[in-house]
């Protein structure tokens, strides 16, 4: 269940609202409050992470407003999505506060070349944005759809694997780069017999490896194999989770060209959400177009790239795999009809369009059971 939809006390015409915006940092939380009893913005500082102090402040201002207005009072709060994640959102919702997590990149700012920026000004701007949302202006900013606790935990595996794969490449490149300085090109550090390989290595001019260089390569190889073993552990956890708690991953991995890793990323990063239409799907991945039309100027600036970057990279990778493993599908034929014998830029442009169409087709496959045209399943 999405915690942003937790049942809150009903709001009637007699209920008044206290608006609260939180500017979060490691050491200090700056709280901007607007109470209907005072009708002005007040600023308060709370030690970073002091939730009891924050709740005491909220309760004190609520009691003041109730005493002054003799009407029921509700509290509506917001903060920007960032390093603090969503634990504070869950805490506020559990305490009966209507909280919204806002996308910081979607909040309008002054476009002057030099604008003042302080925590006080940012908190006040957040508060005005929240009040505009409550007045019924949904376009003033984007509200983050908070995943459930289980959904947030499930996607940790695919994100950890991505970081480990990147680290594996760094260690492997470092080892090969060190050996390249000695003219050695055929060492395979990802093979289990790397120790035996290392003992037989000679430089291109026939000398033994310098002892300090050999020891450095040994240490790099040990780091590399530690990362490889961690990747295997994470992949084993992914397989177990897919078999027990993630039917969407299993359903996606039945299609040719989609393995467990990509199915996990797409399910945990994209398809955990309830999309209303295909435009929302493309927009979430940042694959929607961004037109520029003003006066006589009308052009397309390309895709927005404002969505989930991890999901976008995986979707484009999946599009290339789809062409290889699903050559007879309708989407693959659509791609080849438009690209033809073209290479380079036209292929890179059209692969993004294919990725957009493919993600929409997979969304319909998971939600409506519609198999993509001509797609083949694994035996």
Image (cartoon, rainbow, N blue to C red):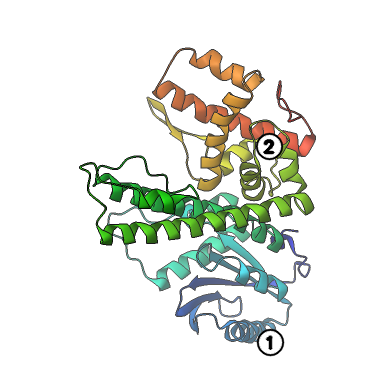
The 10 Å Cα crowd at callout 1, few under 14, some 14 to 19, many 20 or more, is: few
Q: Residue at x 50, y 66 (%)?
A: 83
**104 or 35, which lies in front?**
104
* Circle on res. 67: 1
Q: Residue at x 62, y 40 (%)?
A: 280
Q: Secondary structure at mark 1?
A: helix
Give x and y (percent) for residue 26: 46, 76
Is residue 139 shown left or right of residue 341? right
Is residue 318 shown left or right of residue 377? left
Q: Quadrant of the C terminus?
A: top right
**105 or 240, which lies in front?**
240
Q: How many marks?
A: 2
Is 55 drawn above or below residue 144 in the view shown?
A: below
**123 or 346, which lies in front?**
346
* Circle on res. 277: 2
Q: Quadrant of the N terminus?
A: bottom right
Q: Secondary structure at mark 2?
A: loop
Whether residue 236 appears in this view of the structure is yes
Is 334 drawn above or below residue 232 in the view shown?
A: above
Give x and y (percent) for residue 71: 73, 78
The 10 Å Cα crowd at callout 2, few under 14, some 14 to 19, many 20 or more, is: few
């Amino acid at each position: 269940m999405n915690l942003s939809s937790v049942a809150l006390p009903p709001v009637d015409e007699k209920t008044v609202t206290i608006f609260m915006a939180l500017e979060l940092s490691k050491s200090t939380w700056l709280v901007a409050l607007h109470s209907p009893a005072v009708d002005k913005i007040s600023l308060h500082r709370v030690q970073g992470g002091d939730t009891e102090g924050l709740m005491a402040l909220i309760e004190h201002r609520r009691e003041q407003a109730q005493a002054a207005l003799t009407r029921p009072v509700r509290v509506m709060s917001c903060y920007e999505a960032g390093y603090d994640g969503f634990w504070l959102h869950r805490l506020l919702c559990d305490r009966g506060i209507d909280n919204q997590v806002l996308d910081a990149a979607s909040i309008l700012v002054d476009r002057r070349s030099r604008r003042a920026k302080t925590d006080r000004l940012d908190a006040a701007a957040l508060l005005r944005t929240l009040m505009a949302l409550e007045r019924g202006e949904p376009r003033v900013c984007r509200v983050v759809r908070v995943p459930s606790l289980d959904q947030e935990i499930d996607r940790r595996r695919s994100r950890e694997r991505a970081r480990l794969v990147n680290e594996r490449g760094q260690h492997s490149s470092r080892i090969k780069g060190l050996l390249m300085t000695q003219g050695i090109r055929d060492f395979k550090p990802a093979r289990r017999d790397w120790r035996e390989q290392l003992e037989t290595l000679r430089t291109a001019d026939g000398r033994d490896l310098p002892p300090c260089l050999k020891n450095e390569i040994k240490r790099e190889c040990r780091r590399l194999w530690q990362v490889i073993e961690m990747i295997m552990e994470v992949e084993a956890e992914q397989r177990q989770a897919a078999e027990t708690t993630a039917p969407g991953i299993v359903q996606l991995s039945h299609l040719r060209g989609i393995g467990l890793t990509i199915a996990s990323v797409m399910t945990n990063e994209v398809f955990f959400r309830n999309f209303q239409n295909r435009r929302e799907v493309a927009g979430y991945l940042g694959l929607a177009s961004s037109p520029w039309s003003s006066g006589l100027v009308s052009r397309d600036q390309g895709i927005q790239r404002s969505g989930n970057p991890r999901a976008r990279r995986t979707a484009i990778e999946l599009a290339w795999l789809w062409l290889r493993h699903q050559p007879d599908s309708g989407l693959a034929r659509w791609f080849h009809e438009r690209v033809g014998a073209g290479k380079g830029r036209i292929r890179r442009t059209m692969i993004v369009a294919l990725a957009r169409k493919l993600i929409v087709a997979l969304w319909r496959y998971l939600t409506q059971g519609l198999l993509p045209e001509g797609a083949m399943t694994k035996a």
